[in-house]
Image (tube, helix red, strand yellow):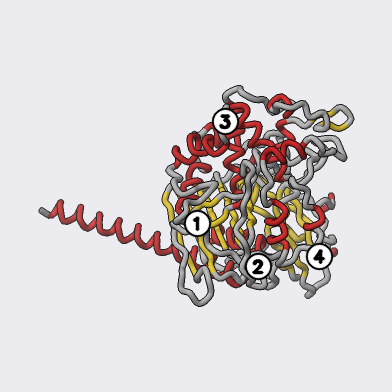
């Protein structure tokens, strides 16, 4: 009897601790969502995370002001360019199956010759597609003039331009496109490249792009609410311009492989996060691979960026539709994924989502609430800058760490401020105290692999108090 009581007590204790853990995680989500809401000024904020295989979602505000229509896990949002990750997985699958090679000329998978898809004899290769280095225009039909003056009317003008524009129109216009540089030389974001990829995939598999999505991604992940076209009784959540003008719903007659018409729910997005964190999934791993062995950042298959951060590997994809913005982020080394969706447009929205994600994950993995000076110490006549990469992360992925601040014009390339590896995850740099004026505050950050700028966290007492979260040094 005593044994059974002891087991029950232990079980109840486990449940209690488990619940406390969940409560703490939801508290972290709430804090991050509030931060995003304040910075974005959106009516609605939705957050979904997956941590060690467990899913958490939260929804805040209301979709339309004054209507009380709060979003939930089944609310449809336009996810726009997050669709490119679906396309990337389909292409990665084709590569692994030997149906296509990254070094192939893209024209090998088109049914027309397209002699214009080269520059000085250099063709567009498949690898140029996935890294946004095709030298192709941003969109077809060409919309460069519309992009010169973005206002709350622009979305409506886009829709007017694209109204009735078919796949046949696309193929015809593709034959008239002129490259202005060699493919593979320069990053140039292009939705046209993604529609071209959708066409190629259809030719490779002999199936529609939509069918390929359903058979290879949606059915396998249980993403039953991700669609290229909603049913008649289904409605997308409203999106707003930064001045709160109601925006139109994006329509397209093209493949949609760049994200022009994809609708999904937070319930499905967290399922996709789970799949993107599957270290045993060969297609996923190929789609995230550092193909060019870059020592800085990389793109995998159509990611916006993959790089090494304070939280280890971080890959993200931003989805920007008319009045709807989303950010899909994975942290494979932490086994954490985050998706945030707001129903507003504006120049600061991406930063709000990115910073909100960073804040959420930092708080999620924080092991201490103790405030302390971070980043430097003073030893006799030396200032010792120090950065310790978390021991549970792969320190071998760090190629360079620099100190950049107000004392060196924020120059991460300054040779005198390159840190030295002291241990597996510890980097230090000694600088003479004489370079700094006593009592004067200096702001600084650490720079990983020339890309990731690391500043103050919530546990840092030497935070400069600005939006940039710089570290502060004072003698």
Position of 222 with respect to 381 (left or right) is left
Badge 1 element: loop
- Density class for disc 4 (Cα within 10 Å; few <14, some 14-19, many ≥20) is few
Instruction: Check disc 1 and report the residue beneath it.
Output: 76
Earlier residue among tags 2 and 4:
2
Q: CA distance from mark 1 to mark 3?
A: 28 Å
Badge 3 element: helix
Which numbered disc, 4 or 3, marks the residue closer to the eye? 3
Which numbered disc, 4 or 1, marks the residue closer to the eye? 1
Residue nearer the viewer, 390 or 269: 269
Badge 2 element: loop
Asked whether the residues under the numbered discs 4 and 1 touch, taking CB atoms below 8 Å apart as contact, a structural biologist would say no
Q: CA distance from mark 4 to mark 1?
A: 46 Å
Which numbered disc, 1 or 3, marks the residue closer to the eye? 1
Circle number at residue 93: 3
Earlier residue among tags 4 and 1:
1
Q: Residue at x 79, y 35 (%)?
A: 175
Circle number at residue 241: 2
Q: CA distance from mark 2 to mark 4?
A: 36 Å
Earlier residue among tags 4 and 3:
3
Furthest-left residue in this view: 1
Q: Residue at x 78, y 48 (%)?
A: 142
Earlier residue among tags 2 and 3:
3
x then y, percent, for residue 190: 73, 45
Badge 4 element: loop
Which numbered disc, 2 or 3, marks the residue closer to the eye? 2
Quarter that holds the C terminus: bottom right
Q: CA distance from mark 4 to mark 3?
A: 47 Å
x then y, percent, for residue 8: 20, 55
Instruction: Check disc 4 and report the residue beneath it.
Output: 406
């Amino acid at each position: 009897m005593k044994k059974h009581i002891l087991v029950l007590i232990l079980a109840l204790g486990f449940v209690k601790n488990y619940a406390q853990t969940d409560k703490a995680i939801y508290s972290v989500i709430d804090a991050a969502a509030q931060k995003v809401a304040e910075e974005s000024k959106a009516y609605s904020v939705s957050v979904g995370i997956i941590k060690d295989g467990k899913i958490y979602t939260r929804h805040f505000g209301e979709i339309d002001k004054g209507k009380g229509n709060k979003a939930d896990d089944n609310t449809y949002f336009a996810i726009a360019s997050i669709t490119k990750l679906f396309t990337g997985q389909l292409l990665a699958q084709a590569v692994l199956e030997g149906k296509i090679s990254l070094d192939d000329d893209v024209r090998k998978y088109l049914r027309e010759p397209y002699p214009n898809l080269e520059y000085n004899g250099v063709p567009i290769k498949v690898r140029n597609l996935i890294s946004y280095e095709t030298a192709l225009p941003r969109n077809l039909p060409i919309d460069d003039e519309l992009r010169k003056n973005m206002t709350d009317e622009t979305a409506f003008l886009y829709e007017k331009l694209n109204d009735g524009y078919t796949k046949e129109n696309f193929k015809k216009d593709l034959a008239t496109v002129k490259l202005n540089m060699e493919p593979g030389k320069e990053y140039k974001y292009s939705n046209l490249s993604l529609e071209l990829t959708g066409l190629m995939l259809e030719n490779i598999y002999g199936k529609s792009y939509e069918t390929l999505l359903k058979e290879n991604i949606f059915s396998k992940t249980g993403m039953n609410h991700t669609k290229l076209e909603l049913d008649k009784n289904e409605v997308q959540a409203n999106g707003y311009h930064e001045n709160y003008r109601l925006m139109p719903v994006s329509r397209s007659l093209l493949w949609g492989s760049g994200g022009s018409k994809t609708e999904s729910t937070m319930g499905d997005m967290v399922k996709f996060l789970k799949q993107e964190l599957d270290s045993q999934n060969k297609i996923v791993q190929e789609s995230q691979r550092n193909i060019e062995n870059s020592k800085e950042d990389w793109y995998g298959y159509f990611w916006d960026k993959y790089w090494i951060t304070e939280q280890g590997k971080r890959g993200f994809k931003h989805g920007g539709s008319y009045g709807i913005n989303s950010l899909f982020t994975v942290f494979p080394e932490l086994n954490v994924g985050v998706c945030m969706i707001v129903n507003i447009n504006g120049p600061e929205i991406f930063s709000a989502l990115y910073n909100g994600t960073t804040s959420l994950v930092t708080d999620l993995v924080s092991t201490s609430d103790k405030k302390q000076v971070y980043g430097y110490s003073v030893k006799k006549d030396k200032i010792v800058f120090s950065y310790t990469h978390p021991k549970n992360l792969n320190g071998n992925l760090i190629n360079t760490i620099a100190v950049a601040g107000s004392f060196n014009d924020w120059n991460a390339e300054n040779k005198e401020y390159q840190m030295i590896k002291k241990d597996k995850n510890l980097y230090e740099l000694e600088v003479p105290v004489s370079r700094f004026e006593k009592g004067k505050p200096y702001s600084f950050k650490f720079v990983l692999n020339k890309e990731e700028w690391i500043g103050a966290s919530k546990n840092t007492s030497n935070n400069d108090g600005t939006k940039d979260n710089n570290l502060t040094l004072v003698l």
